[in-house]
Amino acid sequence: MSSSEEEKLFKTRFKEHKDQIFRLCLGYFQQDKGLAEDALQETFIKAWVHRKQFRADANWQTWIYRIAVNTCLLQLKKEKKEAQKSTELANQPQSEYDLEKEQQIQRMYACIDRLSPQNRMLILMVLEGIPYAMIEETFGLSPENLRVKIHRIKKQLYPCITDGKL
């Protein structure tokens, strides 16, 4: 594949997946758009730099999700070492959203943030609407094992979201 073809293919893949990767990163960074954008850029920079390591027989979408998750986890580790970051509300005017609903969403993401890294990634992918087959492939899980894990995560999250207890 020529360099220009390779670049064109990468740009196409970026356009196809950037929004999903961005939303995944938002979940990791408690809706902090700046950190999510940084992680999105870092993800695709890593994908471009390491594009020769991608196996043609593998699924590109699974590969880019894995890079995104690892990038987010690495960034979170750095953030914890540097300082505790504060959670901010979305930069939308008050009239454009329901404050109570926004608080529920923030509480849900705060609860998700308390999960183990693997469970957090799994539930964020489910919330993103990523097909179960893609999640199974990413984690190396059987369909039944995935369903059980999702059920257990939801069961674990419910008391936290409703009562603030995880």
Image (tube, helix red, strand yellow):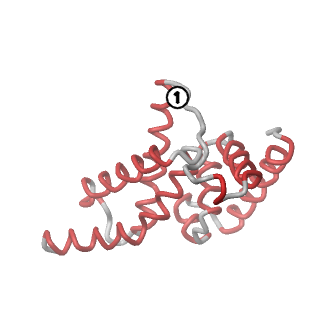
101 vs 85: above or below: below
Residue depicted at 73% across the width and 48% down the height: 103
Q: Residues within 10 Å of mark 1 (few under 14, many from 20)?
A: few
Could you tell me residue 60's position as x and y percent? 39, 68
Q: Position of residue 20 (x, y in %)?
A: 49, 64
According to the picture, the residue beneath numbered tag 1 turns out to be 80
For this view, does 47 lie left or right of residue 28?
A: left
Mark 1: amino acid: Lys
- Residue 84 falls left or right of residue 158: left
> Residue shown at 70%/52% (left/top)?
102
Q: Is residue 165 or residue 137 the one in the foreground? A: 165
**Left of 115 or right of it: where is 55?**
left
Label 1 secondary element: helix
Q: On the rendered image, what quadrant is the C terminus found in?
A: top right
Residue at image location 50% in from the left, 51% down from the top: 25
Along the viewing direction, whichever of 63 and 78 lies nearer the viewer: 78
42 w.r.t. 6: above or below: above
When the figure is inspected, residue 58 is found, relative to residue 108, above or below; the finding is: below
Q: Residue furthest top?
A: 82
Q: Nearer the viewer, residue 85 or 10?
A: 85
> In x, y percent, where is residue 12?
32, 73
Residue 13 sits above or below residue 148 on the image: below
Figure quadrant of the N terminus:
bottom left
Quadrant of the rendered structure where residue 110 is?
top right
Residue found at x 29% / y 53%: 45
For the image, the number of numbered tags is 1
